[in-house]
């Protein structure tokens, strides 16, 4: 059975994620826009990856019923999904 995360666990995870963000060098940050696959003959649309992540994180927030307090979880999940999708498309 999975271990239930406590508030302390979540805060520790958030702290670790923040530290990772601070440690990143500017040249490691992805600046080039990502390309979404066109639907049914539509032209290719180039959208920066941060905008894609923001949109997906908001979708996750809405799916949860707009409950606050999960911003980092939503962002990290969205980032993982978008990067996985872009890697598969490449």
Image: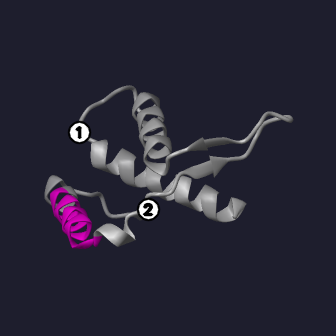
- Residue 87 lies in the magenta stretch: no
Query: 71 above or below 76?
Result: above
Looking at this view, is 58 or 41 the one in front? 41
Residue 2 image-quadrant placement: bottom left
Q: Position of residue 45 (x, y in %)?
A: 66, 39
Which residue is depicted at the point 29% across and 58% down? Answer: 4
Query: 88 above or below 50?
Result: below
Q: Please state the extent of the stretch shown in magenta in the rendering.
A: 11-25
Quadrant where the N terminus is found in the figure: bottom left
Query: 65 above or below 39?
Result: above
**1 vs 2, front mark:** 2
Q: Mark 1 near mark 2, Cβ–Cβ under 8 Å?
A: no
Where disc 1 sits, the SS reads loop
Q: Position of residue 8 (x, y in %)?
A: 13, 59
Which residue is depicted at the point 49% across and 40% down? Answer: 56
Query: 57 above or below 4?
Result: above
Where disc 2 sits, the SS reads loop
Q: Position of residue 64 (x, y in %)?
A: 41, 33
- Side of 40 where 14 appears, left or right: left
Q: Which residue is mark 2?
A: 30
- Side of 87 where 60 appears, left or right: left
Dot 2: within a 10 Å radius of its alpha carbon, few (fewer than 14), some, or many (20 or more) residues?
Answer: few
Q: Residue furthest right?
A: 41
Quadrant where the C terminus is found in the figure: bottom right
Which mark is drawn over residue 69?
1
Q: Position of residue 74 (x, y in %)?
A: 38, 45
- Side of 4 where 55 appears, left or right: right
- Residue 15 lies in the magenta stretch: yes
């Amino acid at each position: 059975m999975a271990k239930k995360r406590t508030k302390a666990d979540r805060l520790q995870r958030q702290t670790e994620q923040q530290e990772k963000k601070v440690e990143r060098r500017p040249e490691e940050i992805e600046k080039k826009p990502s390309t979404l696959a066109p639907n049914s003959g539509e032209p290719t649309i180039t959208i920066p990856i941060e905008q894609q992540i923001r949109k997906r994180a908001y979708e996750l927030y809405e799916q949860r019923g707009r409950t606050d307090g999960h911003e980092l979880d939503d962002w990290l999940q969205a980032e993982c999904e978008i990067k996985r999708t872009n890697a598969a498309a490449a």
